[in-house]
Image: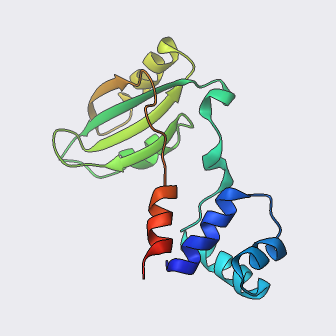
Amino acid sequence: MDQLDARILLALDDDPDATSLALARRLGIARNTLQARLQRLAASGAVREFSRRVDPAALGRGLVAFVSIELSQTTGRRAPAALRAYPEVVEMHSTTGQSDLLLKVVARDPADLHRLTGEFLTVPEVVRTSTTISLQEEMPLRLRALLEAVAGEG
């Protein structure tokens, strides 16, 4: 991603409903250039799906928790695929240290979270889980400051 790509994404962040023509004019570039770059950014995975902007609380899943999962070291790696099948698992990372996976999950309430973590223990290869409930989001995922830094590089 170069400076112009970052400027395009910042302009979209400022006005997600802007037309391609309006964005191109604002950035001082040709509309075809804008569209080609947006297509390339989408194809490369740099721009992710719109659903990432939806607040899980609006879907009735306001409780956020982080679940560390320890996997059996003697079997295959089928657990991540099985855990992806749960819609409440909104992020999953392979990690180093005590656990092998770190999941960000959303639930309706503590009872729903308890149900969910209990189900994780039935997944083959899952040996142990440890759950931390988020009390409050102190800072949501933010990338604007990073985009501004990239847009200003050069």
Front one among 5 and 121: 5
The residue that appears at 34% across and 38% down in the rendered structure is 124
Q: Quadrant of residue 82?
A: top left
Residue 145, above or below 132: below
- In the image, 40: left or right of 140? right
Residue 55, above or below 53: above
Q: How many marks?
A: 0
The residue that appears at 46% across and 30% down in the rendered structure is 137
The residue that appears at 57% across and 76% down in the rendered structure is 5
Q: Quadrant of residue 125?
A: top left
Front one among 121 and 21: 21
Residue 19, above or below 59: below
| Colour convention | rainbow
Residue 123 location, x and y as percent?
38, 35
Quadrant of the snapshot with the C terminus: bottom left
- In the image, 147: left or right of 98? right
Residue 77 location, x and y as percent?
32, 52
The residue that appears at 29% across and 36% down in the rendered structure is 69
Q: Quadrant of residue 139?
A: top left
